[in-house]
Image (spheres, rainbow, N blue to C red):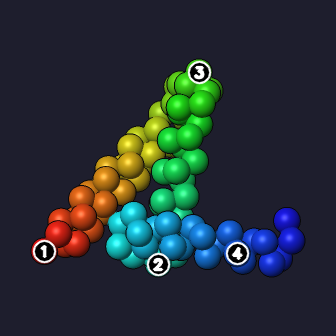
């Protein structure tokens, strides 16, 4: 990948993270990236996601934690925006 594209894509991920959960620090952006990619894989190739879940049960649990974190941050962000 070209450096310019990588920087522009990073900016897209940061903005997506900010809009989704209200923050775009490096840790949160990495969680959002993992969540988005895993969600896409699980929807487009469910057999692959199932295989990965069975092959790496510890990673599956970590992904569950990430998914729950993103969901919770999103709900908090939406509730704060309503006020």
Q: Specify the quadrant of the image occupied by residue 82.
A: bottom left
Q: Nearer the viewer, residue 66 or 77?
A: 77
Give residue 36's mark: none
Give residue 83's mark: 1
CA gap, disc 4 to disc 2?
Answer: 16 Å
Q: Specify the quadrant of the image occupied by residue 19.
A: bottom left
CA gap, disc 1 to disc 4?
Answer: 32 Å
Q: Residues within 10 Å of mark 1 (few under 14, many from 20)?
A: few
Q: Nearer the viewer, mark 2 or mark 1?
A: 1
Q: For the residue labelled by badge 3, is the local secondary structure a helix, a strand or a loop?
A: helix
Q: Which residue is mark 4?
A: 8
Give residue 25's mark: 2
Q: Residues within 10 Å of mark 4 (few under 14, many from 20)?
A: few
First in sequence, mark 3 or 1: give its number: 3
Q: Which residue is mark 3?
A: 47
Question: Measured from the top left, where is residue 33 in percent x and y?
Answer: 55, 58
Q: Nearer the viewer, mark 3 or mark 4?
A: 4
């Amino acid at each position: 990948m070209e450096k310019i594209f990588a920087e522009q894509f990073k900016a897209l991920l940061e903005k997506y993270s900010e809009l989704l959960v209200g923050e775009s620090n490096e840790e949160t952006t990495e969680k959002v990236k993992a969540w988005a990619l895993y969600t896409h894989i699980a929807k487009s190739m469910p057999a692959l996601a199932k295989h990965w879940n069975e092959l790496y049960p510890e990673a599956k649990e970590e992904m569950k934690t990430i998914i729950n974190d993103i969901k919770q941050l999103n709900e908090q962000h939406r509730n704060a925006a309503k006020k």
